[in-house]
Structures are given as C-alpha cells and as structure tokens.
Image (cartoon, rainbow, N blue to C red):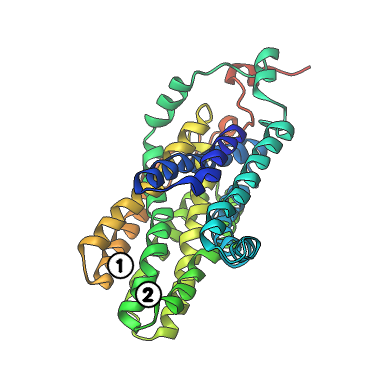
C-alpha cells in the first residue's frame, strides 16, 4: 500500500505538465492506481482488529477515506489554490499547475510512513511469520481463485454495487436532479448535494458498529440481517427521495438516504472478513470492485433516461432486490438466514490465519 501511494504521487505531481487531452487521460489513469489502496487498507484493517470490532473498524477506515476526497477538494479549491495564486502574483495557470505538488508530497510521505512504521498484522510482518513457520505460504493466484469461486463473494459484490455504486452515482446525479426539479442554480445544488458525501463522517462506521453488535447476539445471522435491512431501507429511501415535491423534504430524505447507503457499505465489510479466511484480500478486492461496477451500470441508466425520477426508481428496485439476495449468503461454519449451523471452531476469526490443523494443537 505504501509503495502504491508513493508511485501514485508521481503522476499527481506531474499534472501541471499536461498540455493536451491525451496527456490528461494518461496522467489520470496512473493516478487512478491509488484507488486500489482502498482494498489494501480494508484488508489491512481486517487483519489488525478483532472480530468483535472489525465491522466498525472497516467502516470508519472506508468512510473517512471517502471524506478525505471531499476534504481535499475543499482544501485545494478554497485554501491552497488562492494561496498559490497569490504566490505567483495572480497567475492562475501557474497556480493550478503547481498546487498539485502538495497532495503528491502528502501521498508520498504517507507511503513512507506506512512502509517504515506499519505492520502487516498484530503478530508482525508476513515475511517474518512465514520464515518462522507461523504463517503458511499462499500464492496470489490460489488466494484469488479461492475468493472468486465463493458465491458469497459475488453476492457481496452485488451488495456493494448497490451501496457504494449508488453513492458514486448520486454524487454525480444529485446536482442535476436539484437543478432539473427545483430550478436551483448549480452552486446551490452542489452545496446541497455535498451533504450526501459528508455523512461518511459517521454513517459508514455506524453500519459496521451495528454489524458488530448483532454478532454476539445472533451470530452471522445478525450481520446478514443488518445487511439486508440497511439495503432494503436504502431502496425505500430512494423511492421516497425521488417522489418528493418539496425542496426541504428532498434535503431531509437525501440525508436519511445517505446514512443508509453508507451504513450498508460499512455492514458489507463487516461480513467480508468471514467469507474466506484463507483469501481475505481476494474477497475484499472483488467486493470492492463492485462499487465502481455498480456506478457504471447505474450511470448508464441515468444517461439513457431523461426523467431522473424514473432512473432513481429503477435504482431503488435494484437495491431492494440486492437486499433480498442476503438470504442466499451462507458462510462455512456460520448459520445463514435459510440454512447452515454455527461451529465454534470456525466462528472464531483468527488474525492472521493459522493452519486449521496447527490451530487445533495444544500450545505449550
């Protein structure tokens, strides 16, 4: 993760050298690599925190990551750009071409700190654990295969498409929605739409917390029920939001809708660590890819349908359908909503994963 951040800082610093559309596309492509650190970070936080709090840990990590994107835009646009413009005696072109050096330095420094001081898991770094025999060597190909062949992975992929994918879509569509149906100017519409993103300050963590709290009382069934409830509630809120004729009520419903969307994101990653203990990174990566995939699908719907209310209703149906799919989640060693049973030997989430035979041996 540290290396990826350091690599992505290079094209970030080079934005100021762009002089053509092709150059901008190429630079943005390489900057986009930094987005993969989301999955790495979710896998890392899964390894670092116990099963009792892994949901809220993943939720807060992911939520604050999303908030960071909005905060960066605000800081860059309202603080740093004016400062650099003043430094260059009012030359705005030189200002925007040099201001991107700041986030590049921050990303590079963060990467160095992670490499220098970070540990792979509470027991230490993987390479040391593998040398000592405490951790088995697993190839990346085998890990990905295990994660990809698990049906639960793809159900959660759809779930994440219907929460984080919805968030990405609404971030783009909300502004035009308020402009189209309430005759607001773009400035006011953008300010209202920003409410959606700022719910990440706490809502994603709340979803993870609810998932964690349900586990001791109901086991994995509790986590799955929380997931199903949040997704169905999200779908219902989309229906209500799109049907509003009052601006005030639209803003209220946008806020409530946003809370359920991001809470569902948090609860999704409360389940992810349990899907396949031998391939947590592969599962986290595939599920995480569901977000952009969902955004592309929903984006195409909004592009093809001029009536945005109708597009929101189609989105709501898809989200409610995804919530119903929760009944199909059946994780080995845990009771699902329809079948399966809890097994004490598997209910414990070991971090890092130990070989099952070794774990059963008495430790002296």
Q: The N terminus is located in which quarter?
A: top right
Q: CA distance from mark 2 to mark 1?
A: 9 Å
Residue marked by disc 1: 312
Residue nearest the observer in this picture, 149 or 59: 59
Vertical order, 90 against 319 (above or below) = below
Badge 2: residue crowd in 10 Å (few <14, some 14–19, many ≥20): many
Q: Residue at x 62, y 23 (%)?
A: 354
Quarter of the figure with residue 290: top left
Q: The C terminus is located in which quarter?
A: top right
Q: Position of residue 329 (x, y in %)?
A: 40, 43
Q: Is residue 40 visible?
A: yes
Q: Position of residue 87 (x, y in %)?
A: 65, 61
Vertical order, 180 against 70 (above or below) = below
- The reply to whether dot 2 and dot 1 touch (C-beta < 8 Å) is yes
What element does badge 2 sit on? Answer: helix
Residue nearest the observer in this picture, 25 or 303: 25
Quarter of the figure with residue 156: top left
The dot on residue 263 is none
Residue nearest the observer in this picture, 230 or 184: 184
Residue nearest the observer in this picture, 326 or 189: 189
Q: Position of residue 249 (x, y in %)?
A: 43, 83
- Relative horizontal placement of residue 76, taking residue 307 as reference (left or right): right
Badge 2 or badge 1: first in the primary sequence: 2
Q: Position of residue 122 (x, y in %)?
A: 72, 32
Residue marked by disc 2: 241
What element does badge 1 sit on? Answer: helix
- Relative horizontal placement of residue 29, taking residue 39 as reference (left or right): left
Q: Residue at x 42, y 63 (%)?
A: 171
Q: Residue at x 51, y 71 (%)?
A: 195
Furthest-right residue in view? 364
- Relative horizontal placement of residue 144, taking residue 40 as reference (left or right): left
Vertical order, 188 against 238 (above or below) = below
């Amino acid at each position: 993760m540290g290396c990826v951040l350091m690599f992505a800082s290079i094209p970030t610093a080079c934005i100021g050298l762009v002089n053509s559309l092709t150059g901008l596309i190429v630079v943005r492509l390489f900057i986009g690599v930094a987005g993969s650190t989301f999955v790495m970070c979710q896998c890392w936080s899964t390894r670092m925190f116990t099963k009792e709090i892994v949901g809220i840990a993943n939720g807060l990590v992911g939520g604050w990551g999303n908030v960071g994107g909005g905060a960066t835009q605000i800081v860059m646009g309202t603080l740093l750009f004016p400062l650099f413009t003043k430094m260059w005696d009012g030359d705005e072109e030189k200002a925007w071409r040099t201001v991107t050096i700041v986030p590049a330095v921050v990303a590079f420094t963060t990467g160095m700190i992670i490499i220098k001081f970070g540990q792979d898991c509470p027991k230490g770094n993987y390479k040391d654990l593998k040398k000592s025999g405490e951790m088995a060597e697993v190839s990346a190909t085998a890990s990905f295969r295990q994660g990809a062949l698990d049906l639960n992975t793809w159900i959660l992929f759809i779930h994440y498409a219907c929460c984080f994918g919805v968030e990405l879509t609404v971030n783009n569509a909300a502004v035009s929605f308020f402009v189209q149906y309430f005759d607001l100017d773009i400035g006011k519409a953008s300010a209202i739409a920003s409410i959606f993103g700022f719910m990440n300050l706490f809502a994603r963590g709340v979803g993870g917390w609810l998932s964690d709290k349900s586990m001791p009382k109901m086991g994995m069934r509790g986590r799955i029920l929380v997931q199903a409830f949040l997704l169905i509630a999200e779908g219902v809120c989309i229906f209500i939001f799109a049907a509003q004729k009052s601006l005030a009520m639209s803003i209220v419903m946008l806020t409530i809708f946003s809370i359920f969307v991001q809470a569902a994101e948090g609860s999704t990653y409360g389940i992810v660590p349990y899907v396949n203990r031998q391939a947590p990174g592969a599962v986290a990566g595939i599920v995480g890819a569901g977000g952009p995939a969902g955004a592309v699908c929903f984006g195409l719907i909004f592009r093809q349908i001029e009536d945005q209310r109708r597009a929101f209703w189609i989105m709501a149906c898809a989200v409610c359908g995804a919530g119903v799919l929760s009944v199909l989640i059946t994780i080995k060693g845990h009771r699902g909503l329809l079948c399966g049973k809890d097994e004490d030997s598997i209910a414990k989430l070991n971090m890092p994963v130990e070989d099952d035979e070794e774990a059963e041996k008495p430790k002296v």
